[in-house]
Image (cartoon, helix red, strand yellow):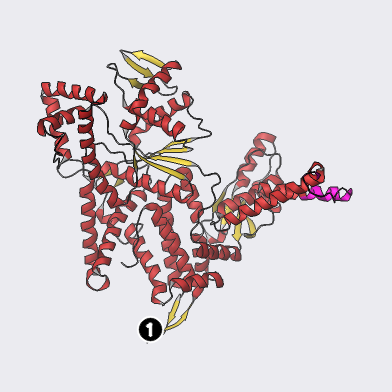
Amino acid sequence: AFQENEIKLLTAEIERLKNFGCLGVSPSLEGLRDENAKLKYRLNFLQKSLQEERSKAVKSMININSRLQEIFGVAIQAAYPDLENPPLVVTPSQQPKFGDYQCNSAMGITQILLKTKEQKVSPREIAEKITKNIPANECIEKVEIAGPGFINVHLRKDFVSKQLSSLLINGVQPPAVGKRKKVVVDFSSPNIAKEMHVGHLRSTIIGESMCRLFEFAGYDVLRLNHLGDWGTQFGMLIAHLQDKFPDYLTVSPPIGDLQAFYKESKRRFDTEEEFKKRAYQCVVLLQSKNPDFIKAWELICDVSRKEFQKIYNCLDITLIERGESFYHEMMKDIVKEFEDKGFVQVDDGRKIVFVPGFPVPLTIMKSDGGYTYDTSDLAALKHRLCEEKADILIYVVDSGQSVHLQTVFAAGQMIGWYDPKVIRVAHAAFGVVLGEDKKKFKTRSGDTVRLIDLLEEGLKRAMDKLKDKERDKVVLTEEELKAAQTSVAFGCIKYADLSHNRLNDYVFSFDKMLDDRGNTAAYLLYAFTRIRAIARLANIDEQMLRKAAREEVVILDHEKEWKLGKCILRFPEILQKILEDLLLHTLCDYLYELATTFTEFYDNCYCVEKDRQSGQIMKVNMWRLLLCEATAIVMAKGFDILGIKPVQRM
């Protein structure tokens, strides 16, 4: 928009010079000294640059909401040039009678004029002035002023049709994001020697989905697993390993159940004074990098890693391990940096840092000289900001850590590691998983639910559901049945989590998540396979659809065609919203709305017309099959961002 405006100004200036007879100078490097030649050179450069930008963007899906904001931004600026940062509010209309989108800026401008200029102007009058200044554009058919000053926007059908054709030809392409920024996402983060439990489920699923979204949007994403792989607990684990498997250095110890191994060592630590002393000695030797103790530590970590990887494979999670041990060598420098800048106070032998606005200080060194979680979290923050050069840093950690993380972030700002106006550091907090009794999700015996058990139960229940529907008898081959089982089981577990606002607690219920009615993965996966089957049953293959996408116009005359077409094109604005607020349930709500809007369309608009008696295909309405295809490819991309794998047959 800026370049287009500058081109207009430069063109006008060249016209002015022409009137004075100043043109005609050769635009050679020598001639650039002349004002008119400089203008022409700049104009050519801008036009070429703009052309390049447009050719890059031509394959991208247009964010219609953003485009309308640009248009109304220009109109408001023209109508009220003296207003600084006037409110710009454009939203999709909730009812068709109010158009397709609404601009609700007039009410806000009324308040500003009253406060800053003491002018009493009605919102309707302001709305009229805005509409008169709307620039020529490719997407608005007409605008209407309704009620006190709402501006109802009606989109052009040919514009929507062209955007759908572009989507079908180019696939789902993200809107251009400008400079490629680096995003670091900290998620999952289980503890070594402890099994992953249901509490790790949310961080793992939410974090993976956020990474997929940022990757799709064109960001450079680093996915980090901040494992709890260092600390005093390793002293008791190594001491217990030495007692139970004295030849561990030469023979790999057969630790089958690491959870039981951890419990045994903890019991001994709590009840045997001699063992406790030896455990502390083991910590000192480990931290001093004694080779035998490092070997013992690596053995314990490897056993845990293998167990974690089983879960990551099931859920299709990709992570780079960078545990607390990675930052251990940096912690000494962190303490020194805070000391050098005068932020450290000594309290009963501890070194603490008070951060303005936070009542509880950070403890960066214990009285015995050891480091804490505060120290390792500060070291991790600095490394990610100063070494990884993150532009955006997201911690997907439960809400219980909120005060701690906000204190750490504020300490990073205080010491000068980052400016929050330039670098975004965010805590993507989430609530806990509850059982159907609305209490923390536990087993009947009161233990924490193991994640691997939960996933196996999901597989069993998904197969039971498919067999209840007799999909195993006539519909699916054995291979297709297995694919449908894993798709439904893991898709439903992920979707049940992601479809709830992450800030709230949510009730884990296999019965609800496997229900094929309502806003569930089971319903959406089934809807997707039905959509994909429409063209297949009409004997229309992928090549025929591609050819039709280039040659056919997507007709949007029926109200349900129009409704579906607009819904499909809202995908980029949904993604943009999530990139800003990190709330993934918005994508789930959108996919459910898309599926139900498609059902309305399919029930009212024949895609394939058959003879009622013979069942023979009489007519294929290709533009409607293209709407089916556009729906399917947007749903497929939505599933991909959520980490859900659809199947062609269910």
515 or 398: which is nearer to us?
398
What crowding class fits label 1: few (fewer than 14 Cα within 10 Å), some (14-19), or many (20 or more)?
A: few
Q: Residue beneath label 1, please?
A: 615
Relative to 269, 95 lies left or right: right
Q: Residue furthest bottom?
A: 614
Residue 323 image position (x, y, % from top left): 32, 35
- The span shown in magenta is 11-30
Which residue is painted at 29% across and 42% down in the image?
Answer: 200
Quadrant housing residue 101: bottom right
Which residue is painted at 15% across and 36% down in the image?
Answer: 250
Type of amino acid at the residue the image marks with label 1 = Gly
169 or 607: which is nearer to us?
169
Q: Quadrant of the C terminus?
A: bottom left
Q: Please indicate, yes or no, whether residue 193 appears anywhere in the rendered image.
A: no
200 or 176: which is nearer to us?
176
Asked if the magenta segment contains residue 21, the reply would be: yes
Residue 554 image position (x, y, % from top left): 54, 70
Residue 290 image position (x, y, % from top left): 23, 26
Relative to 395, 18 lies left or right: right
Which residue is painted at 67% across and 34% down in the image?
Answer: 116
Q: Please indicate, yes or no, whether residue 95 appears anywhere in the rendered image.
A: yes
SS type, badge 1: loop
